[in-house]
Image (cartoon, helix red, strand yellow):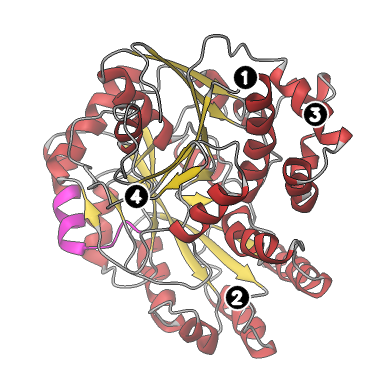
Amino acid sequence: MLQRRKNHNIGIFLPPSPRGPGMIKSPALDVAIMISILKKAENNNVRLFDLRANIIAQDSFWLKRGVDLGVFNDFKLCFNHVLLKKSPKIDLTVKKILKEVSLDNLNFVIFFVSVIEQFSLQFFTSALCIAAQLKTNDPSIKIIFAGNCPKSHIRQIMRRFEFLDAFLEDGNEYAILEYIKNLSTSKALKSVTYRDGNKLILPKANLALQLNKPALPDFSLFDLEKYKSHGKLVFPYELSRGCVNNCFFCYYIYKGGKIYKKNYKYSVKELICLKNQYNVRRFHFIDAEINFDNEYLNNFCKELVREKAEILWSALAIPAKLDFDLLKLMRESGCVQLRFGVESGGSELLKNINKNTTSTEMSQVLKDTHNAGIYTYVTLINGLPMEKENDIFGTKSFLYKNRKYIDSATICDYGELGHFGINVLENLLKTGKNMQASQEIRSTGRLLRSYAKRIGLNEIDIIDDFLSKID
């Protein structure tokens, strides 16, 4: 049976990992929300160990200490290290990392293993190796994992890695209170899978998402200087959780279902409060798509204008169902950049991946966005399983046709993205074999990136691109 402690000393751990997609230059929103929740609860002393910050800042901190973070890219080696036989290389790396932090008197350590609402395998392997060592050093510490991860994988992870005490489910930050407040029982909790001795206790239900419950993101524990790009700071924010699309390659746990949204007036008040508290007026919205509901988006933008929020913002959007009048209103409210998940210019492939749009519609949206004065950032995926030669040609044709309306583009190789790590994880858990993009996929990716560059479409970090458009 779990034992209750009167005072909770809680460490939130952002593990270091190799640079990769999604590691953008802004502090983690889910962590800031959890810090806010924990601080408001009684008897919680919260400390943040942000070991990603130096990587995001691209400084030489880890290099000077002889830490080779590249070991966390070897997923099979990391799994074997914690399950079978220790790797001397990983063992040394982990001990060097832990030498840089003081974890004295902690009762709980929470590891976040997601990035921009997507599971990241690199963060996961890094967290596993570090958590295993922490548990060896002090068996009394409760090791908790949190982040965007499908339930089926959470159950497998908890069964395989016995040094983990709990995994918060549903991407719900309030689940941490559900766990901490019920330490004296052995009952099933909401949105938490946890270990009680040798027994695994599965959740009895989902904890309701409370996006409108006051929990202003608390960024005070972050070293915000390390997150600045060109001397400017960009904060993350969300209006909603959920996605109307159901793309097979995406492992966002709220995809293809209900959209949970904040009251738009409440969101505007929060944004103004964050702006005033941290002297930040630049925001990137991490919603799966800002245009999940055009009536809501219209009201939100009007409220920003009405309240004279005077912020500048960027957002992800589905390249569909955005008319010119709404785009003009978005620009008036401060929208500077829209990031479109185009994925492919191939008509058949778009159907196969459930994108719910066409290349013709995407072209019109890009043109209208450009003409409304909003910069466009396009992402594409090379090497999807059902991709054919015609699809690759379609992508090149799409880029060329819309080159006047695309300001930046990035092309990712399927199998290499940390965002797509779940399928790699699933394969590792079942077979013990690693899965990576083939040489053919990588070769095609290089050719596509070269082509995009030749027609004037540069690849750049989304925050750097955002800032370059406004400063």
The image shows residue 159, relative to residue 112, as above or below, that is below
* Residue appearing at x 64%, y 83% in the figure: 387
Name which of mark 1 and mark 2 comes first in the sequence.
Answer: 1
Q: What residue type is labelled 1?
A: Asp
Q: On residue 93, which mark appears?
A: 3
Callout 2: 10 Å neighbours few (<14), some, many (20+)? Answer: some
- Residue indicated by mark 1: 138
Q: Please state the extent of the stretch shown in magenta in the rendering.
A: 289-300
Image quadrant where one finds the N terminus? top left
Q: Which structural element holds mark 1?
A: loop
Name which of mark 1 and mark 4 comes first in the sequence.
Answer: 1
* Residue appearing at x 26%, y 69% in the figure: 323
Name which of mark 2 and mark 3 comes first in the sequence.
Answer: 3
Q: Which structural element holds mark 2?
A: helix
Task: Give the label, 1 or 3, closer to the camera.
Answer: 1
Q: What residue type is labelled 3?
A: Thr
Alpha-carbon distance for marks 3 and 4? 35 Å
Quadrant position of residue 274: top left
Q: On residue 203, which mark appears?
A: 4
Q: Is mark 4 in CB contact (under 8 Å) with mark 2?
A: no
Q: What residue type is labelled 2?
A: Tyr
Q: Is mark 1 in CB contact (under 8 Å) with mark 4?
A: no
Q: What residue type is labelled 4?
A: Pro
Alpha-carbon distance for marks 1 and 4? 27 Å
Which of the pair 9/301 is nearer the observer?
Answer: 9
Q: Which structural element holds mark 4?
A: loop
* Residue appearing at x 20%, y 49% in the figure: 301
- Residue indicated by mark 2: 400
Alpha-carbon distance for marks 1 and 3? 19 Å
Q: Classify residue 29 as left or right of residue 456.
A: left
